[in-house]
Amino acid sequence: MFKKIVVGLDGSETSENALNVACDLARNNSAEIHLVHTPQPQTVAFAMGAIAGYHAVTTMPSEAEVKEAADKILASGETIARNNNQAIAGTHVTRGDPADEIVACAEECGADLIVTGRRGLGSVSSLIQGSTSQRVSHLAKCACLTVV
């Protein structure tokens, strides 16, 4: 049924749950998995081991911090996939709005499913702007699965 699955990762528990579900679907459908991460200040702070009140709220992270955080999040995703006996077909680090970038990645990969977590690390801003998973579902031209 599904042959290419794109998973949005932000380092949150729900995005890791989404990847675990995607791995199960990939195994059952002989599908490939692509990971996409769009660094945001809160995800950089989280990946760097931040706690509440981290200075990223007032200071933009450096390019080196952004790259290091993205590498950590994607490495964690690859470990989760490996623990599920799945390989990652591609990793994609993009800049911009996470929902727009996840959908663009899915279109570029020819994905037939996008899997995201329901609430990621951007939950505070989603109260004002709406959640990434909702926006992905609205914009996507393929099936979407939102995982708790």
Image (cartoon, rainbow, N blue to C red):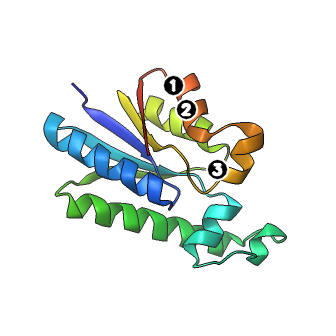
Q: Are marks 3 and 2 in contact (CB under 8 Å)?
A: no
- Identify the residue at horizontal 55%, vertical 71% (top origin): 47
Where is residue 90? Give x, y as percent.
36, 50
Q: Amino acid at mark 2?
A: Val
Q: Is 24 located above or below residue 44 in the figure?
A: above
Where is residue 148? Give x, y as percent.
44, 46
Q: Is 114 located above or below residue 142 in the figure?
A: below
* Mark 3 residue element: loop
Where does label 1 land, which residue? 140
Left-right relation of 138 to 90:
right
- Identify the residue at horizontal 40%, vertical 57% (top origin): 16
User: What numbered label is drawn on residue 136?
Assistant: 2
Mark 2 crowdedness (10 Å alpha carbons): few <14, some 14-19, many ≥20? many
* Mark 1 residue element: loop
Q: Are marks 1 and 2 in contact (CB under 8 Å)?
A: yes
Left-right relation of 28 to 136:
left
Task: Indicate which disc, 3 or 2, sits on the residue closer to the N terminus.
Answer: 3
Mark 3 crowdedness (10 Å alpha carbons): few <14, some 14-19, many ≥20? few
- Identify the residue at horizontal 46%, vertical 53% (top origin): 14
* Mark 2 residue element: helix
Where is residue 139? Give x, y as percent.
57, 24
- In front: mark 3 or mark 1? 1
Task: Indicate which disc, 3 or 1, sits on the residue closer to the N terminus.
Answer: 3
Q: Amino acid at mark 3?
A: Arg
User: What numbered label is drawn on residue 53?
Assistant: none
Where does label 3 land, which residue? 95
Q: Are marks 3 and 1 in contact (CB under 8 Å)?
A: no
Q: Amino acid at mark 1?
A: Ala
